[in-house]
Image (cartoon, helix red, strand yellow):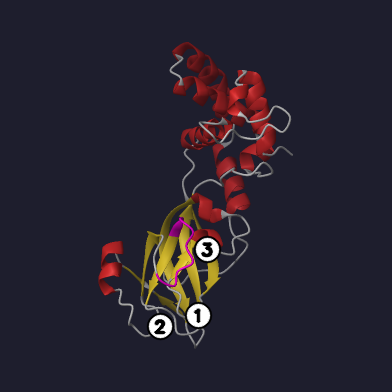
Amino acid sequence: MATLVDVRKDFVQLSGRYDLVSSTSSYANNTSNIGADFFVTRGQKFLESKLGIRPRLFEFSKALVVGTYSYAFQDFPDDNSQYQALKAIKAVYLLTDDNDYKELLKISLQNWYNIFDSDTANGTPDYWTVGANASGTGNDTGTSSLLLWEPPDKTYTIKVIGFVGHESLTADTDKNYWTIVHPDILVKASLYELEVFYRNSEGARDWLSSLMSDVNGIDHDNVEGEISGITRMRDSWKPRSIGDTL
């Protein structure tokens, strides 16, 4: 079962671009400039665009902290790291005292700052938006964050419904559909993106011809279903009053 480091190693050896890794023993990504992972990521996006793979709905829970209005997505309890693949948030629900779900109202970031008041007492959140590095009692670390208002007066639970694209490959041991099922095609796509990036038209055409032969042989519906199975959260909760079916 291939991982990101396996794909990275094949990509580097086939391209001869050993400068894209920091070590030929560990094949660690070269992060000082454009490294191998840059092209692997572009290759994966190319494959999914060619296959017409659409973002899918997912959901996860978060326990709120009293007085805390900002929640960095990287801190969400998400075993599949889906916050990395977050395309957009569709809705946010709050679990009420009578075990019902209350949908919070989405507002713009500007309006969120307009209603922000450091003297406001904690209460039941009614609004949400997305921001980054909010000040105050937030726990952001520079990533996108869910901002609520008012700050919660007790430990409510919220459900976030959003759209996820593909699962990101960042750590050496990361795996996703492409590394597990079609690592060779992902390597080819990465090599194609390398040629495109450096404007080698002839080399790009050669890789594209070989790559499209492989892509055309893939069952598109099966790929979309498999990716959904790999990236979907284990939570089986179904949101109320949402048109999309999970």
Q: Quadrant of the N terminus?
A: top right
Identify the secondary structure beneath mark 3: strand
Q: Is residue 165 magenta?
A: no
Q: Are marks 2 and 1 in contact (CB under 8 Å)?
A: yes
Q: Quadrant of residue 78?
A: bottom right
Amino acid at dot 2: Thr
- Residue 59: mark in rendering: 3
Q: How many marks?
A: 3
Mark before the other along the chain sequence, 2 or 1: 2
Quarter of the rendering containing residue 125: bottom left
Horizontally, is 57 left or right of 122 in the view? Answer: right
User: Which residue is more in the foreground, 173 or 29?
Assistant: 29
Residue pointed to by mark 2: 124
Query: Which residue is labeled 1 in the image?
Result: 156
Residue 142: within the magenta?
A: yes
Between 117 and 89, the one lying in front of the other is: 117
In this view, the residue in front, 112 or 134, is: 134
Pick the front one: 54 or 81? 81
Majority SS type along the magenta span: loop
The local crowd at label 3, few if under 14, some if 14 to 19, many if 20 or more residues have their Cα within 10 Å, is: many
Magenta-highlighted residues? 136-144
Return the x and y of residue 82 as percentages of the image width and height.
55, 54
